[in-house]
Amino acid sequence: LLKIGLTGGIASGKTTVSKLLAEKGVPVIDADVLGWRTYEPGTKTFAEVVAAFGDDLVAQDGTIDRKVLGGRVFGKPDEMKRLTDIVWPGIRELAGQELERLESAGERTALLEAAVLIEADWLDLVDEVWVTVVDPLVARERLMQRNGWSAEEADARINSQLTNQERLAHAGVVIENDGSLAELERAVEEAWAALQARRNGSA
Ligand code: ACO
């Protein structure tokens, strides 16, 4: 099993790249979804998150209201660290289990999409890292359009993340996404074809 870690900044097209690779039959593990699973009601992590951030996180239906939790941690590095110290070990464990399951199932390739793969120091979970890259000014435009944010809000989120340069230091494969969806599709086709060529070469 070749394990690919896919990471990239906000509005860099990570999720679209995941979808395109899923269409090629690659099983995708979404670390955001695993993260939400770690604090479902009844789990130890649920209790830890509520103890750390307060009972008012709990919605009517008994789940943790992620919008409320997000409001407490985004843009507040100390609070975000408090949350990720609680949840990352569990997410990592679930991701490892999923990768093992895919390996046992005889899959040839798996993709782990994780926004903060590098920050969490999870590089050892994967064999190669693919990074989606977008110019910060293009990311700002996309966030203003897609999320309805002001330029200041967009810049604040972009500036709170690693820079493209910092991510590129870990990248085996770089997917540039400053242009159209058609251009992104072409870039993914090329990366995929290059991967097949590398694997056939080394087989
Ligand atoms: N640091 C930076 N960005 C993060 C983090 C984090 N710790 N956690 C999530 N994000 C990103 C998501 O990847 C997503 O990015 P994208 O728009 O580029 O895809 C964006 O923030 C929104 O995240 P959602 O989970 O979709 O937002 P939601 O409002 O449902 O929940 C919350 C927000 C509560 C903060 C939730 O994201 C969370 O519990 N985060 C902590 C767990 C974590 O770090 N998850 C990321 C995957 S694990 C990893 O990559 C190592």
Image (spheres, rainbow, N blue to C red):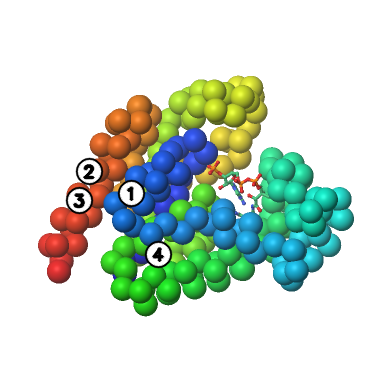
Give amino acid for label 3: Ala
> Mark 3 against mark 1, which lies toward the viewer?
1
> Which residue is label 3 attached to?
194
Q: Residues at badges 2 and 4 in contact (C-beta under 8 Å)?
A: no
Sequence order check: which comes first, mark 1 or mark 4? 1
Which mark is on residue 126?
4
> Which residue is label 2 attached to?
190
Left or right: 39, with 89 as reference point: right
Left or right: 121, with 80 as reference point: left
Assess disc 4: are there few (<14), some (14-19) or many (≥20) residues with their C-alpha within 10 Å of its C-alpha: some
Assess disc 2: are there few (<14), some (14-19) or many (≥20) residues with their C-alpha within 10 Å of its C-alpha: few
Left or right: 22, with 55 as reference point: left
Q: CA distance from mark 3 to mark 1?
A: 17 Å
Which mark is on residue 23?
1
Instruction: Residue 159: tell me if it is visible.
Output: yes
Q: Quadrant of the C terminus?
A: bottom left
Q: CA distance from mark 1 to mark 4?
A: 21 Å
Mark 4: secondary structure:
loop
Give amino acid for label 4: Val
Outermost residue to the left? 201
Q: CA distance from mark 2 to mark 3?
A: 6 Å
> Mark 1 against mark 2, which lies toward the viewer?
1
Mark 1: secondary structure:
helix
